[in-house]
Amino acid sequence: MILSKYPFLVQKEIIDNMNHLDLLLLSFVSKNMKKLIMSSQKKTSKSIRSIEYQYDRKDGTCVVYLIDESKPIVKYHRRSARTDDDLIMRIVKRGEDKTDNVQLNVSGKMIGFRFSDDYKYPIASYVECDKESVFQSIHNLFLDVFGDAVEYNWEEPDWKDPPEFFVPFIPKLKNVSFCIGMYLDGHFSEVRNFENFFSSCPAAKTIILNVNKKMKPLSPESKFFDAESVYIESHRINTPDFVRHFRGKQIILDGIRYRKSKLIDIVNRWKSGDAFQNLEYAHICGCSEMKFQHLVLNEIGAKFIDANRQPPMHTIRSLIDWYDRNYTTSPLISYRYIVRETDNRVASVFMMGGAFFIGVWDKTEEEFLRMVE
């Protein structure tokens, strides 16, 4: 089928009904074809939740996933929620054999691609000295085809001890958020190395931290605290306070033993407006002294909703589990709430089975109580 032979309205109708991978491949054909695709961008990108670069620093390979919310949801295990059907491109270091490369102009730069019947998606290649500009050109193509309203993430899920003097490769890409999974052990358990790593990276959207070794406290000005969300897992040891100066939106602390006084301090600093101004949700596991729940609720000044009424359910999209395309925070329904002094903002609070939950509402106390049935 030669698309250019059809009237413009017919071309546009065809474009609007093509899948995302075919649109990407079609954008390579010509500048006019890419302009036609861009003119339909709003409709074609409506169902896209995110485009995600998953980079493997060991071999320099990057796989690019397009997460389409219009696809039927399959109940995957969260850690394998992506499939090959979500792949739209692979970016690899160029090998010695270049015979199967097709040179294509991508956002003004010539890049080698391989196409094969064995896989649906194209494979782009780069040489080390030209690596960042290749990623930038490919990303600019995605922005042209799918638009800048789509969420873009750069993900490195398995950071362990790097070689000495290693500088992470994180290209400067427009509208891209940084997500990282890290093991706090060896090299990164030295607070200086930990701080230097995050100071050399863009502010993170998500940090998943598995703590296996003790570390000195972080500076209050650490860029670690600028992350939008953090998941701290530590089942073996007590850890430094990774959230005291947290400036982001979502916190999960798993396996960390929190004393009653420490938990109360977190809540009261939110209530006073001294900290956690941007907090949306927190889940703290392993709270000790949970037999004193009523004392904790009294000391944080929790208010009560009448037992004959139904409190609203707090749930938001999770920023922490980036593998799951539709993952939300655990539904929080509680008869207890607290109020921030500075702006009268409400947060639902709940304690059960050694866990403490906070769900912050974008509501004043008066607006919140109107939601109560």
Image: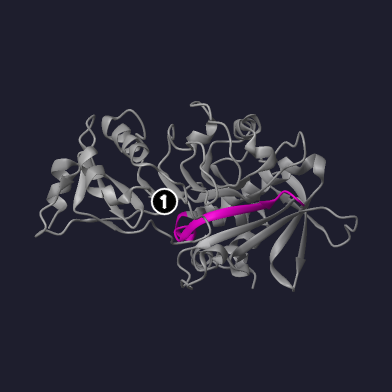
| Residue at the disc numbered 1 | 286
The stretch of residues the image draws in magenta is: 42-58
90 displayed left or right of 323: right
Image quadrant occupied by the C terminus: bottom left
Residue at 71%, 70% (x, y): give it: 119
Q: Residue 165: x, y in percent?
A: 76, 33
239 displayed left or right of 158: left
14 displayed left or right of 334: right
Residue 149 appears in the rendering? yes
How dense is the environment of label 1, judged by Cα within 10 Å: few (below 14), some, or many (20 and up)? some
Q: Residue 218: x, y in percent?
A: 53, 30
In the structure shown, which secondary structural element does the residue marked by tag 1 occupy?
loop
Residue 57 falls inside the magenta stretch: yes
Closer to the camera, 322 or 97? 322
167 in relation to 32, above or below: above
Residue 79 falls inside the magenta stretch: no
Image quadrant occupied by the N terminus: bottom right
Q: Amino acid at mark 1?
A: Gly
Residue 363 appears in the rendering? no
